[in-house]
Amino acid sequence: MELKTFDKAQLAAFYEECKAQYAAYQAQDLKLDMSRGKPSPKQLDISGGLLDCISEADLNGQAGDYRNYGLLDGIPEAKALFAPMLGVETDELFIFGNASLQAMYLTISYAYSHGLLGNTPWSKLDKVKFLCPVPGYDRHFSITQFFGAEMINIPMNEEGPDMDLVEKLVSEDASIKGIWCVPQYANPTGISYSDEVVRRMAALKPAAADFRVFWDNAYCIHHLCDNPKTILPILAEAKKYGNENMVYLFASTAKVTYAGAGVAVMAASKENLSDLKKALNVFTISFDKINQMRHVKFFDGKFENVLAHMEKHRALIQPKFDVVVSTLEKELAPLGIGSWVNPQGGYFVSFDAPQGCAKRIVQLCKEAGVVLTGAGATFPYGKDPEDKNIRIAPTYPEVDELQKAMDLFVLCAKLAAAEKLLAE
């Protein structure tokens, strides 16, 4: 029986029962943090071999002595290992340090300070706008907000961003300079872009010559199913339309090996990479080539070994996703409270509460000892216009702790929904 069908007396009784259960949770003095999508200690443990997999002899590689300066764009062994992850050629790949977010920030910074491929620096323009599929990744939005770009919400559907709206906006407005995309297992919705969406993205006809698609394929190998969907390689698709300069791709091993010591990669056309190197040559002499070689040795230089390693991650985190989805289905689905997607990969479960309830749910959880990502974080400026989306990050806690957190979460969702209905 859905909660909205309860009469006033039933609803009041339901609310009082939930309040009593909530008071019992507060008495437990819980301290659980589910605010970020962090690998658990057990996940980090499976990469322990990174710490002793190379010797000094291994550092005399194909391109010389990796202990020394040089090789700004990365060692050839690492390029060969990671190019298949993004579906690009090795000469279209640049190896960064441990964080792909750094690569995105530097690219945006260069566009503002010097301009892309000879175009006017964005800092000299009256207005710079960015398209932001929502709900989306808060750190993407933080970058463009930091530089002062005006961010425009683009609704997501089950196939990806609303491409009718994207095509219309970018073709009409030259001040729109980019779009953020997480194409596989989108953060937080878990949606994977359809072939049609990828093709339409690759075929865009923007009014701005320096419009760029920021294709953050952070979860491209983070599968939670046996037969994962394969996303079309956007750089190859863009070449078909003469748009190879329109796309930047990003990924990293932050959630593959060590979050604090992974390897980040960026792919782009040769022309784009040559342009960006003007800034990177000033920024650094080279990134951590020893860590790059460490990853090559750990995976024996074979991408199939990276995929096998990801199956170990799946074994550790899939039970946690099962806890989240099964608890939502058991406790909230019969009451008609909220909606969610059972993701086939990635790091999050996106929960849509009844409109106007997300902040209240997050507040109730926090006051009972469970910290979630702030309501609104998945939208530009931290403002969810409907106050309904909550990003659930299940990977870090142990299963028993996660079950406690989810039991509290669904209770808080019931409380917030009941409060809303009683107020109406």
Image (cartoon, rainbow, N blue to C red):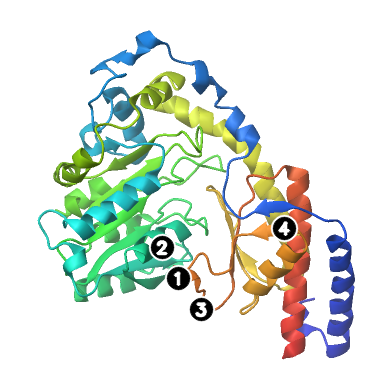
Which label's residue is closer to the chain start, 3 or 4? Answer: 4
Viewer-closest of 291 and 357: 291
Instruction: Report x, y in % for residue 272.
Output: 17, 47
Residue 375, percent across and down? 59, 68
Q: Nearer the viewer, residue 56 or 159?
A: 56
Q: CA distance from mark 3 to mark 2?
A: 16 Å
Q: Which amino acid, by three-letter code, is at mark 3?
A: Pro
Residue at the disc numbered 3: 385
- The x and y percentages for residue 415 are 77, 74
Between the C-alphas of marks 1 and 2, the distance is 7 Å
Q: Mark 3 or mark 2, which has the lower sequence index?
A: 2
Tell me where residue 241 appears, x and y as whole percent.
17, 55
Q: The residue tagged with tag 4: helix, strand or loop?
A: strand
Q: How far apart, in angstroms, are the residues tagged by discs 3 and 1?
A: 11 Å
Residue at 29% in and 15% down: 61
Q: CA distance from mark 4 to mark 2?
A: 25 Å
Q: Which badge, 4 or 1, is on the more N-terminal residue?
A: 4
Which of pointers 1 and 2 lies earlier in the amino acid sequence?
2
Q: Which image quadrant is residue 200 in? A: bottom left
Give amino acid for label 2.
Phe
Q: Is residue 64 visible?
A: yes
Camera-side residue: 406 or 339? 406
- SS assignment at label 2: helix
Q: Is residue 315 left or right of residue 80?
A: right
Residue occupying the point 22% across, 52% down = 238
Which residue in the structure is indicated by mark 2? 141
Distance CA(mark 3)–CA(mark 4): 24 Å
Secondary structure found at label 3: loop
User: Which badge, 4 or 2, is on the more N-terminal residue?
Assistant: 2
Tell whether label 1 touches label 4 (CB within 8 Å): no
Residue at the spot of label 4: 370
Q: Residue 182, relative to residue 158: is it above or below?
A: above
